[in-house]
Image (cartoon, helix red, strand yellow):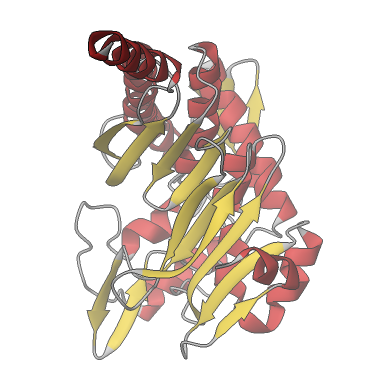
Amino acid sequence: MRVARHGLWLLLLWALAACSPPPLVQQQSYVFGTLVEVSVYGAPEAQAQQAIAAVLARFDALHHQLHAWQPSELSRLNAALAKGERAPVTPELAAMLRDAQALSGQSNDLFNPAIGGLIALWGFHADTPQGRVPGSQAIARWVRAAPRMRDLHIENGTVWSDSPAVQLDLGGYAKGRALDDAVAILKAHGIRNALVNIGGNVIALGTHGDRPWRVGIQHPRKPGTLATLDLHDGEAIGTSGDYQRYFEAGGHRYCHLIDPRSGWPASGMQSVTILVSGAHAGTRSDALSKPLFIDGVARLPYHAARLGIADYLAVDAAGQIHASPAMKARLR
């Protein structure tokens, strides 16, 4: 009798193990100058690992294709634009440039990937910021030149510019595009539930078991999180902040997010996080957080409404927190 009960108990344990979902599979890497983490839930480990490897390979390819100051397809295009020449580009880069043009137009050019030369002038085209404030005359020359994405012409696999001042930097676009690509790759590998985090730019696929994916929003001045929220399937958050790429000089903090109207780093915000869903959620969450950050707290509701962003959380330069009603309802 004891043997029978023991055998029944082992059978029950085996059945429970067979019915339980595979564990969470996670892998980290370092791409786009930041930490990347891909988490897959509820898939066999071999399948999850194969999907994650494909995602990370795509991230590495995008990083090398879009690098602004090391040899890449983008840097070769920039060299041609500086000479006033036409340059051939791959269909993929042409599509990304058109997409960036559209987003720039929506933001009234506050998201402006054409100011790569100005970003370089401030020393941010380096793995470590150079920490030197440029001369005011050099800044003024870039402002007068006013390079914009609408100066670009993209036609039949060729790109040229009306302005030789256009130098492309897709740093405010690439991470978001990578998130969207990651979701497509994961789905192609049969993955239904995953979370992809690229340095605080995050997108959710499916759920984490019987609950949504829970993510933290980094505090811009203190260790740890400012708040947490649950991300549902297809939702993405993008954060622009002054706390990752910056330098200090003369008692002032200068970040890599530069206002193209003044030529100076934006200083009215510490961070802005937006939540978006729908098509191209990753790309939009990355690019459209920039105009909200650059234009400051006074015009935060205006830009959010105009861009169709209902959920935002911002910390202004004084450390005050501003959240939309929709975002307040989501935060923990």
Across and down, in percent, residue 299 comes to 70, 78
Quadrant location of the C terminus?
bottom right
Q: Nearer the viewer, residue 292 or 47?
A: 47
Q: Residue at x 50, y 19 (%)?
A: 191
Q: Is residue 32 visible?
A: no
Q: Is residue 258 visible?
A: yes
Q: Is residue 174 above or below residue 230?
A: above
Quadrant location of the N terminus?
top left
- Give the image quarter of residue 233: top right
Across and down, in percent, residue 308 comes to 78, 56
Q: Is residue 34 above or below residue 111?
A: above
Q: Residue at x 29, y 53 (%)?
A: 125
Q: Nearer the viewer, residue 268 or 43?
A: 43
Across and down, in percent, residue 133 comes to 28, 76
Q: Is residue 164 above or below residue 222?
A: above
Q: Is residue 100 left or right of residue 23?
A: right
Q: Is residue 63 left or right of residue 88?
A: left
Q: Is residue 10 left or right of residue 233?
A: left
Across and down, in percent, residue 313 comes to 59, 70
Q: Residue furthest front?
A: 1
Q: Residue at x 57, y 41 (%)?
A: 282
- Give the image quarter of residue 306: bottom right
**Number of callouts:** 0
Q: Nearer the viewer, residue 224 or 153?
A: 224
Q: Residue at x 71, y 34 (%)?
A: 279
